[in-house]
Image (cartoon, grey):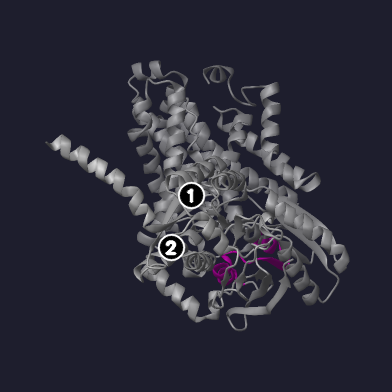
Amino acid sequence: MQLIVNILVLAAIYALISCGYVLVYRVSRVLNLAHGELMMLGGYMLIVTAATISSNPIAAIAGALVLSLMVGGLVYVFLMRKMTGEMVLAAVLATVALGILLRGLVILFWSAQIQYPAQTLALSNPTLNLPGGASISFYSAMLIVATVVVYSTLFAFLRFGSWGIRMRAAGQSPLLAAQRGINLHGVYALAWGLSTLTGSLAGILIALDSGLSQTIVMIGLKAFPAALVGGLDSLVGALAGSLIVAAAEVLMIHYVDPLLADVVPFLVLIGMLVVRPWGLFGTREALDRV
Amino acid sequence: MLKKAIIGTAIFTAAALPAAAQDAYVIGLTGALTGPPAGTYAPGVDAMRIYFDRLNKAGGVNGKQIKLVIQDDSAEPGKAAANAKKLVAQDNALLVINTSLSSTYAPVIGETKRAGVPLLFANAVCPKEVNPPAEPLQFCSTAFAATYDSRASLAFIKETAKEAVNLGLVAMAIPVSRGEIDFADTQTGALGFKTVAKEIIPPPTPDYAPFATKIKDAGANWVFSWAPWITQVRSVEALRRLGWTGDFVTWAHLEAESELVRLKDPKLFVVGANALFQDGLPIHKEIEAAAKEGGSQYPANQMAEGWIAAQVIEAALKSAGWPATPQKVADALASVKVDTKGLRGGPIEWTKENHFRTKQYYRVYRWDPTKNAIVVAKDWYSYDVK
């Protein structure tokens, strides 16, 4: 039972992060390689809101998420918008530069210390005992709940929401969408905002669970194979890919060698690229565009 | 006219710069000030900056100022190599300090060796080349020491355990940490321990529960970890969340004091070579005041390593005299004896053959819930370094 819980927690972390990669790629065809840094920034936003806006945990978390949404939108407006019409590679390189900048700024403002926002907000992290002798920390459980809520909301938003439909349209054909009067820049800014918000939510929950430092960026990178395995333009794929990668990782740690934890996501990815390069639920056409 | 004035100023400045540089002791530093492991290294660098600023205000050493040139390597070997080259060739550093991951050592050693400049490892793991017989140009003031730390930690477990020891071992998947845990594994048999789990955890691990589950399921009642702090603390926290009630022994990195207070776990023991600031020694108060005055971003209780390194450098420069050369500084370092004023269990003493220290002292701390404070679990004990 504990193994299943471990798989679900890890899958929730990967899924919550990888949906950000998918949202931006699906709408604008840009691989956002600064997603790990934006996720980290979400954790630091919580420290800011806890110190300035409110020591009430819910208000502080809500404030951090709103700030993250705004940061994502601003990244598009002030950086990625300038990449419109340029080669995709230029946009990807811009995200790499953004990531380096964010890492430097975080050190400048918050130092290199491990931060514990849960301590700042006087929050405890109790252990929840589950049937079958398994246990899970409160914030790990919250990661699973958050993943279910985020994905359900995104599915509903993209299926029924007017802006969600516009996002899908822009993703399928920007030219036709623009001709139909859809504000492409608005759609792209929203995609960046939502992507940063979901990544930040992951960053905030990880920070509340086990502290916040620059190593969180590497977790952001580890979720990237999950998005690729599922298919870079599919939210269902991100969910499935996360579950597959997490299961492979946890089972390898438990039954084979813990050292394999680092390479398993990439082994799964290579296997998928050989068999089905566009991922489990991805589209072939999207891969061609990559 | 203006053009002439600018050219004239530029020529004067270019001519004056080397003279100015020669008028101070130039110390170069390459360190991980940014990047994922920066939390371990940056406080030590800040401590050195504060120490030398204070020293300069008080008149410097031998009447000369100390110029600390700090370069960030982000724990990347390529950047460390470029930094070392700049420090020895452009800044004419008399001594280079490396405060970064062990992966940066090879290029920095190469550059300094070619230039004949001594290299001090401070707040970064000591390479074996500083142990007897030491490489002439390499020195190390860092508290932690391969093999000695495991011996000290396992000896503490042997002394403290009231029942048969089923030991779990935890390392980070980096060569230095793995090597030490492999060494510890070779020692357990002779001590009558049984190693039931050995987890080598990759650095970018989002969730430590899968590793902790293995250790708990293997029936470990003691765990020893020697790794960067993040791996140590997340392992113990993951074990506790699974309901594990055993004893956890680990290395007292810079973060240990704050973390003992945060975790309040009476069965978490930190083995270290530095006295914690809760001891309240005069030197601790001096560092606290200096950190406050120097406007440091870091807590004073993380500055002992940097402070000790600066004490060593001050002593060596005093002995090297003026004008100093890299060789004179190396010779001075090779015979240095520094009273750490209680920051360590004894002095740092180097000889021509031993650039680590002649005696390595250890102390063990833990959280005591009855006193609501950190207490000494085992007072200073030492090993001769041969």
Q: CA distance from mark 1 to mark 2?
A: 35 Å
> Vertically, is A72 above or below B252?
above
The reply to whether the C-beta atoms of the residues labelled 1 and 2 are less than 8 Å apart is no
> Vertically, is B315 above or below A145?
below
Q: Which residue is mark 2?
A: B322
In the rendered image, which quarter is residue B270 located in? Answer: bottom right
Report crowding for label 2: few under 14, some 14 to 19, many 20 or more residues within 10 A (C-alpha).
Answer: some
The chain identifier of the residue carrying mark 1 reads B
Q: Amino acid at mark 1?
A: Thr
Q: Amino acid at mark 2?
A: Trp
Check the picture and name the quadrant holding the C terminus of chain B: bottom right
Q: Look at the numbered disc 2 and give the secondary structure of its residue.
A: loop
Is residue B252 found inside the magenta-colored segment of the image?
yes
Labels 1 and 2 within one chain: yes
**Residue that sits furthest to the left in the current view:** B1
Check the picture and name the quadrant holding the N terminus of chain B: top left
Give how far across and how far down residue A84 sits, in percent: 37, 23
Q: Which segment is the magenta one?
A: B236-264
Which of these two is toward me, A106 or A85?
A106
Q: Which mark is residue B34?
A: 1
The total number of labels drawn is: 2
Q: Which is more foreground, mark 1 or mark 2? A: 2
> Vertically, is A274 above or below B373?
above
Regarding residue B212, the answer to whether it shows in the image is: no
Give how far across and how far down residue A1 sits, in percent: 76, 51
Give how far across and how far down residue A131 sits, in percent: 74, 57
Q: Look at the numbered disc 1 and give the secondary structure of its residue.
A: loop
The residue drawn where x is 58% and y is 50% is A143
